[in-house]
Amino acid sequence: MNKKQRQEQFDALQERMHACRLCRKAGFYIEPPAIAKGSLGAKIVTIGQAPGVTEVVAKRPFNAGSGTRLFKWLGEAGIDEDWFRRTQYMTAVTKCFPGKNKTGGGDRAPSPTEQALCRPYLDEELELVQPKLIIPIGRLAIEVFYPRGVSLEEVVGTEIQKDGRWIVPLPHPSGASRWHQIAENKPLINKAIRKIKKRYRELYPN
Ligand code: SF4
């Protein structure tokens, strides 16, 4: 497939995701459209859990508080937010806002059925973008690459190579998530940031 064909397929995929209502048809509350953004030329892809309500309004992943924290971490790895949003690719395990959870204290975690319905899009995104570094953010995204039920303590601060791609997990940076706020976990996050920095410098030496 040449560059032009790849770009056409990428644009068509974005349109299909935008128009997708599969989870609604399956009876789940979701608020479309799909939120995923970035460039086909990206060497780095971030995968979050699902967009939140502010992402739907801003129409970009990791907006507001969770985005501020994520880009603080990436900033420590030498990555500039504007550059990253312009040139890299940001997506999620499920791409439509899933609504609030029952307590209203955070967003509803997408069900296994919704994750399965949305998975072909994620596979297609990765196949077309062909990133060299994937940063799964939060448990659901981490479980795309690691065994189900693996703990954050086991994987944050480590990296693995799969299909020629480096995978460096981060915890979810949302204010509703406690893990990243626990002092003992900070060294693991710092370790993950150092690994991202190393891979980023290899990919973008200048
Ligand atoms: S979350 Fe994914 S599968 Fe579900 S409606 Fe949105 S784009 Fe479609």
Image (spheres, rainbow, N blue to C red):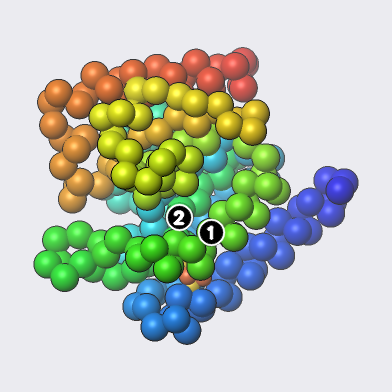
Q: Is residue 108 left or right of residue 78?
A: left
Seen at 41% across and 45% down, the residue is 143
Residue ID for mark 1: 119
Q: CA distance from mark 2 to mark 1?
A: 7 Å
Residue ID for mark 2: 93
Type of amino acid under label 1: Arg
Mark 1 residue CB less than 8 A from any atom of ligand 1: no
Q: Is residue 58 visible?
A: no
Seen at 37% across and 50% down, the residue is 140
Q: Nearer the viewer, residue 60 or 152?
A: 152
Type of amino acid under label 2: Val
Quarter residue 45 falls in: top right
Q: Is residue 72 left or right of residue 83?
A: left
Quarter residue 124 falls in: bottom right
- Mark 1 closeness class: few <14, some 14–19, many ≥20 residues within 10 Å: some
> Could you tell me if the residues under marks 2 and 1 are in contact, i.e. CB atoms within 8 Å?
yes
Q: Is residue 206 above or below residue 15?
A: above
Quarter residue 71 falls in: top left
